Amino acid sequence: MKLNELEKEIESGKFGEPRRLALEHQKKVGRFFDAEKLIEVSQVHIMADAEALGYSGIEFLENLSNYDKNEREVWVPTITDPRGADFKAYENIKQSKSFVDMEKRAIKAFKSLGVMMTDTCINYQVFMPPVLREHLAFGDTGSSIYANSVLGARTNFEGGPSALASSLTGRTPMYGLHLEKNRVPNKAFLIKCDPKDFSDWGALGAIIGKQMNSYWDIPIIYGLNIKPTSDELKHFGAAMASFGSTPLFHIDGITPESYLFKNLKIKPEPITKLDLNLFYKNFHPNDDRLDVVVFAAPQLSLDEMRILSEMLDGRKIHPNISLIVCTAPSVKVLCDTNDISQRIENSGGIILEGVCFYNMHAREIGEANGWKRLMSNSAKISNILGGYGYETILSTMEKCVDSACQGKIVR
Amino acid sequence: MNKRIFKGHIGIGDAVQGEALVANDNFSARYDLDRNKGIFSRKSHKLFNQSYVNKILVLNVAKGGVASAWMLKSMIDINIAPKALLLNFANPIIAQGAAYANLTLIDRFKVDITSVIQSGYILKLIPENGCIEVLNDKSK
């Protein structure tokens, strides 16, 4: 990988050991993907909850925080993905204090690096939304696919160590989605049904994601008869990225780069209502037993919180069921001032802020609470939690709420 | 016996030798593993309930979330980790995680690597030139 003068100085250690180590890491990754050079990024979104970090990751961050301020502080605006514990509410879900202590150590270290603790995976909806052709280092598959697809920015999936390296050097290896040639669709789909709920959008994204053979497959989607909202595309992209490791999609006439591919000659694969129904069947058990209902992955926007609160208004969650909602701290503030939080909490729902359910030691909190059956309108979380010992049920927000209130799965 | 050698793209990590655990399925540290017990915990995974500890995992593609990038290192630090990863296609997350953890990783072979390597094979991996050598076929 060819380095410019500044990058050679970083490599030499002139700007301190943390930046030298970061560049060394970027050279390894760049070599693996045949990157010819580094490219400057304007902002970094870093995923580093304590469960993912483990003690070794926390010690790594603490070691960096021991360097001089001018050596350790980030060079570009850097914000964080959801944390692994909500300090105000962790006892409500029987989360171990030891996990909370891990989080506190990680946060202290991040702050000393100059990282802004935003604790959200919907940063593109609440902070510094990227713009067309802006180069980024985004560290959440959901935020990355949204930035690439809906906003036309350029980012690869940047895992925590690489996102941190980008924040320290202000650049990232130029490979993958930073190159125009890798943004051209090679698969096409024709949607022959109208998604009606966030869960339908997630299911559609999942169906497409499952048909992607690797990170390097890019789909283009035709046939949508409705103009999707930001929240609908959020569920669509998050599920696609989760089921397929897919970093980018184009939707004909909707996403900003789709006009570039008018002359593609790829026969589209149809996706019908039957495909959608078959997908849902993967997440429906034979009996109606239920333990917990979760709205998360991605965190809920202000409008999703409003919709949920109106569905719960004047109702009570069944005593045998827990209902958990995860949102960004900045969204929670607005929910508090708009009576949204009160409606959810009056029904018995638990709002967690700055976290996402699956990255807060979901296996351990499931065991502590006796949760096995989990219902959600998020296709992404329905996918992830299978590996954490849960049986997951995917359904609409309305049926999730009805189920939480009736104490059993409502179909 | 003729040497069986498979060539992939230049990889990451050190040269290692070990026993293969193979499936035509995909890989994510967060989605698929119980990292405390060292087993595949996703019921639908073809290696469900099998131990990955100290094995050279041979799988199709890297899937799922970004957490794997941190998790590979923490798995190594508690000695509940695979010895290496061979994939038909890695994604950036797995490559970044391997670089951070110094875990051996090779991908992009000319053949479907999950179809030519079988569980039990003893393999020697040289990431510097992307080569895999089958040392002996333990399954025979």
Image (tube, grey):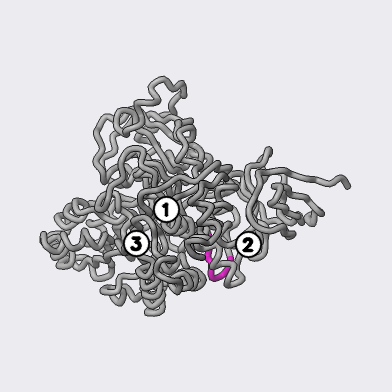
Q: Which residue is the site of mark 1? A: A170
Q: Chain of mark 1?
A: A
Q: Chain of mark 3?
A: A
Query: Magenta residues: mostly which secondary structure?
Result: loop
Residue A222 colored magenta? no
Q: Which residues are magenta?
A: B33-38
Disc 1 crowd rating (10 Å Cα; few below 14, some 14-19, many 20+) is many
Marks 1/3 in contact by CB < 8 Å: the verdict is no
Q: Which residue is the site of mark 3? A: A82
Where residue A370 appears, as percent x and y from the top left, is 38, 72
Both labels 2 and 3 in a single chain? no
Disc 2 crowd rating (10 Å Cα; few below 14, some 14-19, many 20+) is many
Taking the spot 15% from the left edge, 67% from the top edge, the residue there is A346
Q: Is residue A208 above or below residue A121?
A: above
Taking the spot 20% from the left edge, 54% from the top edge, the residue there is A302
- On residue B82, the disc is 2
- Pick the quarter of the image with the N terminus of chain A: top right
* Sequence-earlier tag: 1 or 3: 3
Both labels 1 and 3 in a single chain? yes
